[in-house]
Image (spheres, helix red, strand yellow):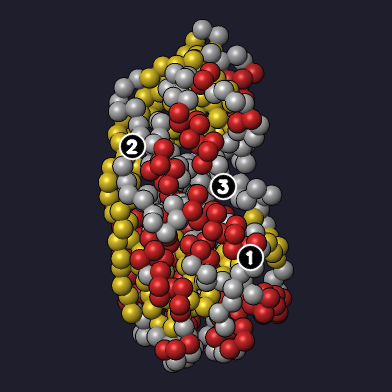
Amino acid sequence: MSETASAAHLASHIKWLTEVIGVRLAGSAGERAAAEYIAAQGSTIPGVTVTTETFPVWERAVESELLQVEIGGQWYTFASSLFGAAPSTGGAVVEAPLVFFDSATGYQQSDLSFMKGAAVVHLGCHIESAEQYQRLIEAEPAFLLFVDIRFPGDGALADGLFPAYVHAYGARTTVNVAYHDVWRWRREGATRARLCVKGERRRSESQNVVLEIAGSDPAAGVIYLGAHHDTQAGTVGADDNAIGCASLLELARLLAESGLRHTVRLVSFGAEEQLSLGSAAYVRRHRAEVAANGRFMYNIDGSASALGWLVFTMNSSAAQESLLREVFTKHGFTYELTNEPCPYTDQFPFAAAGVPGLWVYRKNCVTGVYYHHRYDDIIANLDLKMAARQLDAAVEFLTRMSGDDAVSAQVAFSESEQRVIDTLWETICGGWGGFTMK
């Protein structure tokens, strides 16, 4: 294949998604506009068939947020951001005493009753234990002030609660607050907090956009490529994940006339920021076909930071890992490789169905990227020439894998890896039965 990926094409798509559309919350008009843009662009590519599937989500429909904290007898206003899928205060002002709680060691305590009726400052915004989340909700705090301890900045980062947890145990009003603000509260002896959130989560629909390129051999199976088009609140998500959507469209253009034996399905997922609801919905809906015919899932999410290094999270065979390293080395890329299953990616539901794959990511700090879920996740912070070279490597990797029966053959995960995947899929993602919104 002589044609190569175009940084200009990537820039055009990203600018439309981030500057014309902007914030793209799951279930919102912005997310729907992004899905429609991707479908329209995909339909212009010869050889590509486009379909769109919908699924239910909670839309975060916040009108206003006001957080005040009492310090030294005076009330001060601070930024906050309601978590996706969390209930608001319904416009009421809720006041409560402040309690500081570290999630790293705090759950070792046998009694959490001190949280009852309190505004709990929760150091850590991801609770990866369903038992701990259940204990937190049953303690009946007045509301929760979550602190993202991975990124100690001066802004309230956006995030979401795990939908399976909300379904199983309910939720309290939960907002994210800035790490530096919490530091001040602790240092200056803050005693109470008031929170008022107007607006409410509401039932809506999100969408998965599927761009399909038919393979020359229907029996060869399917190679999936994925990205997501939604964002968190307050961010236009250039790297998370307009770059992934732009990459899918560019890969569709490059692969459409490649003549691969395998059918290629490029899926732009909705509601990834609600813990990969879109990819989970897709895999649950098509479970039998995905499990029987899926050969690989190549997921792109946060791949273009101008400064940093590549990270591949890969659950696959040794032959696939070997080919990946050979090809990316040839294209001038080195990378950090981890084989630990990660539930925070659209690749993970495919792994739960037994399909090998990887997540392409690029860090610029040891915890990820400094602009994670922030206002400054903008196109100016991306290196699109480098991202285009990644796509050239991806095309060669996928083309060579498709042409080699030994590399593209179905593989089984190791017993230990499968056990980890099954546990995460069931406890954090809701398993194969999924859940209904309530």
Name the N-terminal-most of marks 3 and 1. Answer: 3
| Residue hosting label 2 | 62
As drawn, is 21 to the left or to the right of 219?
left
Residue 415 location, quadrant: bottom right
Q: Residue at x 51, y 41 (%)?
A: 130
- The amino acid type, in three-letter code, at marker 2 is Val
Near mark 2 (Cα within 10 A), the count class, few <14, some 14-19 or many ≥20, is some
Is 273 on the left or on the right of 54, as rendered? right
Give SS at disc 2. Answer: strand
Closest to the camera, between mark 1 and mark 2, is 1
Q: Quadrant of the C terminus?
A: top left
Q: Pick the quarter of the image with the N terminus.
A: bottom right
Which amino acid type is marked by label 1? Glu
- Rate crowding at label 3 as few (under 14), some (14 to 19) or many (20 or more) other CA atoms within 10 Å: many
Q: Which mark is residue 371?
A: 3
Amino acid under disc 3: Tyr
Label 3 residue SS: loop
What residue appears at the point 48 percent right and 58 percent down from the top-left corner? 241
**Tag count:** 3
Q: Which mark is residue 415?
A: 1
Q: Residue at x 55, y 47 (%)?
A: 372
Q: Secondary structure at mark 1?
A: helix
Label 1 vs 2, first from the N-terminus: 2
Between 16 and 356, the one lying in front of the other is 356
**Left or right, 341 with reference to 375:** right
